[in-house]
Each structure stands twice: as structure tokens, then as C-alpha cells.
Image (tube, grey):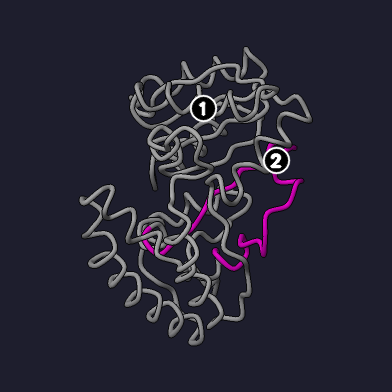
Amino acid sequence: MTNYNFLNIVKSKVQVDYQEQMLIGGKSVTFLNPYSYWLLRKQKHVLSSIDHVLIDGIVLVQFLKLVGLKCQRNSFDMTSVAPKVFAEASAKKLRTFLLGSKQEEIEKAVDRIKTLYPNLEISGYRNGYLKESEKHELASILIEQNIDLIVIGMGTPHQENLIKALRELNFKGSAFTCGGFFHQTARTEIGKADYYPPIFDKLHLRWLYRIIDEPKLFSRYFVDYAKFVLVFIWDIINLKNGKRTTGN
């Protein structure tokens, strides 16, 4: 009997670290943290449609060691994966489309990205409030403009679901999710390298700074992360026993 445990899917997708080949060839990449693990566990088919998973957050990095997965923390931000993606996209002259956050924030983020990467070919951008009826229109734009790379910051599971929908609508470019990157980039002060103050980054306290900046995230870190711990332990038990777990 096939084992549908979510951990089996994660194990088959997780990459130890970011690799340049993820950027080309029509690949899709998303980032998994305890919160998105808990959400995507309810929609296993969505993660199954993603090519590569990178682990965002030291907590999940440590938990995955319990099932023999050793990987690096990778986040789509200016201290981790984002500079690599934008630098390589610039060098390879990839036509890039940016999607996510509110319109005012994506505009500010695009201006900042253009300043940091003047050779990046940004062929288009828009906010992340995308209606179901607009997905066909977006796919048509991406295909007509021969977009090589789309970076999507809509939050989990919306961004992963959009990648799945774009694939079904015949978009052949590569896709990266980026969570709150555009919001954070828009709020980063000019002259600073990153949204997170260095001390918070050094002490692995990004979660605390995000709560300070966005108090609504309090429940995510203190309620949803507790749920993650419970379901992760359950998944480990079921993985060892070779049983299925609930979810679509």
C-alpha cells in the first residue's frame, strides 16, 4: 500500500541548499516552515506539484533531523536566496515577473529591487490579490511575454496553488515563492541591506522581529507552531509505522 504520509512527500522534495539549476528549466521552488508545513499538510497534492522545497526556519531544520534530513536554512530574503536568484537572473537575462503583496508595496519593492539589480529584466509586476477569473489572464500574459521566471509572494497555500494553476494553464517558466518578501522589501529602510536588524538575524530571532513589525503574526508563532509540533510528531509515528495520514 502506498504511504501518503506528508513527510514522505517532503522528504522527496527537500533540497539541502539552494542550487543554481533551480532557477531555470521550468522548475518550481517553494519554502517550507512550521506554519506552511501545517497548512500544506492539508493539501498534499499542492506540494506534490512543486519540484523543489527549501527549508525556511531553524525550527524546521532541527525537526527534520529527526527523520534523517540534514539541510540548510534558506529564506527568500536579502540575506539568503533572493540575492542569488536576482543576480543569476540578471546574468542570464531572464525575463522576470514579480507578483505579490499590496499594489503600493509591490511598487516600492520593485523600485528597490531595480536599484539593487539594475540589470534585472523585470518584464512586469502586480499585486497579489488575484481573483480566480484573473489566473487565465495572468497565464496568458506570462506566456505572451515569454516570462522565464515568476516570483510569487501571496502566502501559503495561495502561492503554491497559483503555481499549480499556472502549470495547468501551460506556463513553462520557472517559479519561486517568496512569502512576505515584497512587504518586507517595501518596508526596508533605504541604505539597509535587509529587513531584519542584524542582531535579530544573528540570534535566530527573526520570528520575534516579525511579531514586533506585524503583531497579527503572534498567533502564528504561539498557536500554529504548537499545532505543527503535534502533527509533525504524529507524522513521524505514522511514517515509522507505514500508515497514511489524513488530508487531501
Image location (x, y in percent) of residue 75: 53, 53
**Res. 192 mark:** none
- The total number of labels drawn is 2
Quarter of the picture containing the C terminus is bottom left
Q: Give the residue pinned by disc 2.
A: 23
Q: Is residue 65 above or below residue 132?
A: below
Q: Residue at x 63, y 41 (%)?
A: 83
Q: In front: 14, or 90?
A: 90
Q: Residue at x 39, y 81 (%)?
A: 233
Q: Residue at x 59, y 37 (%)?
A: 175
Q: Amino acid at mark 2?
A: Leu
| Label 1, label 2: how far apart the Cα atoms are | 21 Å
Give the residues in magenta: 10-35
Is residue 27 rendered magenta in the image?
yes
**Res. 112 mark:** 1
Is residue 85 rendered magenta in the image?
no
Q: Nearer the viewer, mark 1 or mark 2?
A: 1
